[in-house]
Image: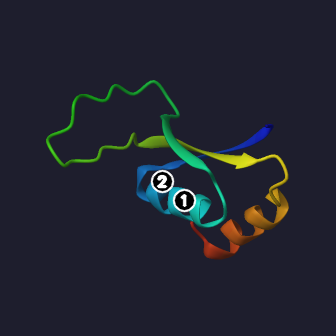
Amino acid sequence: MAWLQLRINTSSEYAESIGDMLTANGSQAVTYVDAKDTPMYEPKPGEVLLWPDTQVVGLFEADADMKGILQRLGKAKVLG
């Protein structure tokens, strides 16, 4: 099966909202990646740390309506 990746560079402030929107729009998986080379040390129990500059990666099936997904993301104003 073929897949499409949508990569969005953002700040930690918007990363989780973008991930939630990707999931709501059919992403099969969402990954948060360091967009720069910023060290991140082990968080405390229950703490979620995201990098100041985070890349949010959504994995979509090859036939996903990417144009529609991008339009909905833009309208939701989660891109900062």
The x and y percentages for residue 62 are 82, 46
Residue 76 visible (yes or no): yes
Question: Is 39 on the left-hand or right-hand side of 30?
Answer: left
The front one of 35 and 19 is: 19
Q: Which residue is mark 2?
A: 15
The x and y percentages for residue 10 are 54, 49
| Residue that protrudes farthest toward the bottom in the picture | 75
Is 51 placed above or below 63 here?
A: above
Dot 2, how many residues are within 10 Å of its Cα: few (below 14), some (14-19), or many (20+)? many
Question: Is 45 on the left-hand or right-hand side of 17?
Answer: left
Q: Amino acid at mark 1?
A: Ile
| Residue that protrudes farthest toward the left in the picture | 45
Residues marked 1 and 2 touching at CB (< 8 Å): yes
Q: Secondary structure at mark 1?
A: helix
Dot 1, how many residues are within 10 Å of its Cα: few (below 14), some (14-19), or many (20+)? many
Question: Is 60 on the left-hand or right-hand side of 38?
Answer: right
Image quadrant containing the C terminus: bottom right
